[in-house]
Amino acid sequence: MLRVLPLFLAALLLVGCTTPQKAYHGEFKSAPDLSLISPPPASFKLGPSVNIREVDGFKLNKLRSGAYQVLPGEHTVRVLLFSSSIYGVTMTDPAQLSFKTEAGKKYIIDYEMKGERVMYFVTEESSGTRVPWH
């Protein structure tokens, strides 16, 4: 029984992480009427992960860093890089990205390192096109 409980809790946590969080005012809308903003899918890539902290002033549940539903249009997103190891937790200073979304599309926020500098980029998932941000 003691072995099953941790597995059950881990499964429950994973299921909770996959449900997009609503990051807009008003009534719930159907998926085709919304845009999704997300960090990259979980992978086995080494290094820090993108953590979305805020979308358009909505402070988000930090335990559920998954996709966020927004209305189409201009959005401002605050992100940071987060990593944990046996040596502790490290985070970068938050960065702010503003970009435009379209209904029915998913936008992935990722990064690459240029020396010591973090370079964020936004990609529209279905086309693979990088979206300009400011």
Image (cartoon, grey):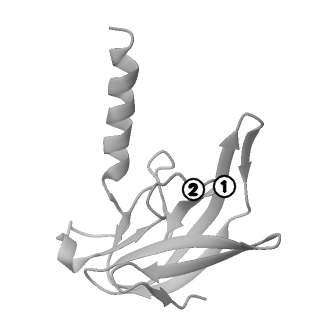
At label 2, which amino acid type do we have?
Answer: Lys
Q: Which residue is drawn at 74% across and 49% down?
A: 90
Q: Do the residues labelled 1 and 2 touch (CB within 8 Å)?
A: yes
Q: List x then y, in percent, for residue 48.
A: 65, 55
User: Is residue 56 at all visible to an observer of this figure?
Assistant: no
Q: Mark 2 points at which residue?
A: 45
Helix, strand or loop at disc 1? loop
Q: Which residue is drawn at 46% across and 50% down?
A: 61
Q: Which residue is drawn at 54% across and 91% down?
A: 132
At label 1, which amino acid type do we have?
Answer: Gly
Q: In this view, does 13 lie to the left or right of 119?
A: left
In the image, residue 99 above or below residue 45: below
Q: Which residue is drawn at 33% across and 84% down?
A: 72
User: Is residue 99 at all visible to an observer of this figure?
Assistant: yes
Q: Quadrant of residue 104?
A: bottom left
Q: Quadrant of residue 34?
A: bottom left
Q: Name the residue under label 1.
A: 47
Q: From this viewpoint, which residue is outermost toward the top?
A: 1
Helix, strand or loop at disc 2? loop
Q: Which of 115 and 105 is in front in this view?
A: 115
Q: Quadrant of the C terminus?
A: bottom right
Q: Nearer the viewer, residue 23 or 115?
A: 115
